[in-house]
């Protein structure tokens, strides 16, 4: 018999009932160290007092009015994002997937309004992930995501990740509207795009006029040690998708764009009932107030150095379990030699939460304000998990 919840997840037999900082408490009382942070969502850990205060204060005042009216908290958050990034304008959503939908619509409308509706193709990369909507799965293009859901939304073309020649040829096609990519592939296995490649792609976009859409849903909001990952390459996109960390655990996403990229959008061309509602934006402002501070971001970089160094040591001690560490900032992946799912299970056995990804990788995405001692504790638990996976040598 089907469960009351549609069985689209293979859930771990764990139910967390409370949390504090980087720790989660299971209903049986066991404490788990959370290096998944709700898949890169809880950037300030669990029950951060500033976020709780922002949410409860707003909840006592006004929950929802709709975008028929001005929403002061939304305007405040948009101003913060515009001030902190390349963007001139924002649209708020409830998720990364919805930001993807708007990114695709905005790019197509841009060319349509410029009198070139035939420029409607969105180029995307193999191994990418942009959400589970019809546009999101068409953009990702992998069989795992699309099988059985056809006919797929047309107008997407895929380039093998890392194939510069194929990219150059694909960008030269006259029907290309935009290219979409994650500066660090998340679901794909924590695979960063080298800075030089992001710069090269920016140049290609400038040459051809194609819009550059960056999906920073997972790698943005301080995760790599800059507010947004593309800043490391010294480039700016035309359109950027944001979600996950921006709400610190409250559902919130955003689509950021330059004035030019957004020029096709006008009143009535897009909307959302809940997007940017007062509760979500109260929390978003509280997150931005902390995470966008340079002193906070430099601490993320320092903690990232600690974690990375400890993980390099872990790989060296367990070459039969782990192959390598990769990633950026506090978005790190361990490519495994044993099945990554076994490593996740062994970590649960040590009361540690980590997240599987493609390419036989496990993801470490801790809260960005994780304590140094919790970083050390997490690596100690991973070490014990690795030991538990390797049979002891026969005497
Ligand atoms: C890079 C990226 N884009 C888009 C999404 C979709 O976001 P959401 O699950 O909030 O719809 C995700 C979610 O994991 C993601 O990692």
Image (cartoon, grey):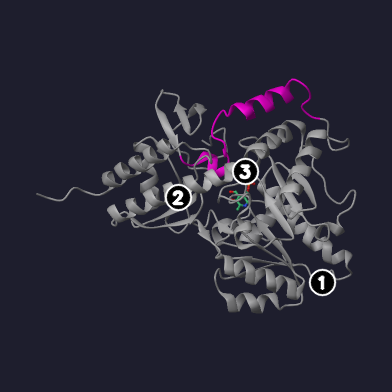
**Which of marks 1 and 2 precedes in the sequence?**
1
Q: What residue is disc 3 on? A: 244
Residue 390 appears in the picture as rendered = yes
Q: Is residue 75 above or below residue 123?
A: above
Q: Look at 41% across and 23% down and name the residue there.
A: 28
Of the two numbered discs 2 and 1 in the rendering, the one whose residue sits closer to the viewer:
2
Query: In the displayed image of the protein, which residue is found farthest to the top?
Result: 60
Instruction: Please tell me which residue lies in front, 327 or 291.
Output: 291
Q: Is residue 173 above or below residue 78?
A: below
Residue 118 marker: 1
Mark 3 CB within 8 Å of ligand 1: yes
| Number of disc labels | 3
Query: In the displayed image of the protein, which residue is found farthest to the left?
Result: 395
Marks 2/1: CA–CA distance: 47 Å
Q: Along the horizontal axis of the image, is 352 left or right of 389?
A: right
Residue 177: x %, y % from top left? 76, 68
Mark 2 CB within 8 Å of ligand 1: no
Residue 147 appears in the picture as rendered = no
Q: Are marks 1 and 3 in contact (CB under 8 Å)?
A: no
């Amino acid at each position: 018999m089907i469960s009351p919840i549609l069985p689209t997840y293979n859930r771990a037999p764990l139910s967390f009932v409370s949390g504090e900082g980087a720790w989660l408490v299971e209903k049986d009382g066991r404490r788990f160290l959370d290096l998944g942070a709700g898949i890169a969502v809880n950037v300030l850990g669990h029950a951060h007092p500033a976020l709780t205060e922002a949410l409860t204060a707003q909840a006592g005042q006004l929950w929802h009015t709709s975008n028929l009216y001005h929403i002061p908290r939304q305007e405040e958050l948009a101003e913060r994002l515009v001030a902190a990034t390349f963007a001139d304008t924002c649209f708020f959503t409830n998720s990364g997937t919805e930001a993807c939908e708007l990114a695709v619509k905005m790019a197509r409308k841009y060319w349509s309004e410029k009198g070139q509706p035939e420029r409607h193709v969105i180029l995307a990369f193999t191994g990418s992930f942009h959400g589970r909507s019809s546009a999101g799965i068409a953009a990702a293009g992998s069989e795992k995501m699309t099988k059985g859901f056809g006919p797929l939304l047309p107008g997407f073309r895929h380039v093998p990740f890392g194939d510069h020649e194929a990219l150059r040829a694909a960008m030269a096609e006259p029907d290309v509207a935009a290219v979409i990519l994650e500066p660090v592939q998340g679901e794909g296995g924590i695979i960063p795009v080298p800075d030089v490649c992001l710069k090269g792609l920016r140049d290609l976009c400038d040459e051809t006029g194609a819009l550059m859409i960056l999906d920073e849903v997972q790698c943005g909001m301080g995760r790599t040690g800059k507010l947004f990952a593309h800043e490391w390459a010294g480039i700016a996109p035309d359109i950027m998708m944001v979600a996950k960390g921006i709400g610190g655990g409250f559902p919130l996403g955003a689509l950021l764009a330059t004035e030019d990229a957004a020029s096709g959008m006008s009143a009535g061309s897009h909307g959302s009932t809940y997007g940017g509602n007062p509760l979500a934006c109260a929390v978003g402002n509280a997150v931005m107030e902390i995470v966008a501070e340079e002193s906070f971001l430099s601490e993320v970089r320092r903690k990232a150095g600690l974690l990375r160094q400890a993980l390099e040591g872990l790989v060296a001690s367990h070459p039969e379990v782990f192959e390598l560490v990769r990633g950026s900032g506090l978005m790190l992946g361990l490519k495994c030699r044993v099945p990554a799912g076994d490593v996740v299970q062994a970590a649960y056995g040590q009361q540690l939460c980590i997240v599987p990804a493609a390419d036989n990788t496990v993801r470490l995405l801790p809260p960005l304000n994780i304590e140094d001692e919790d970083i050390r504790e997490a690596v100690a638990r991973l070490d014990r998990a690795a030991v538990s996976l390797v049979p002891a040598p026969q005497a």
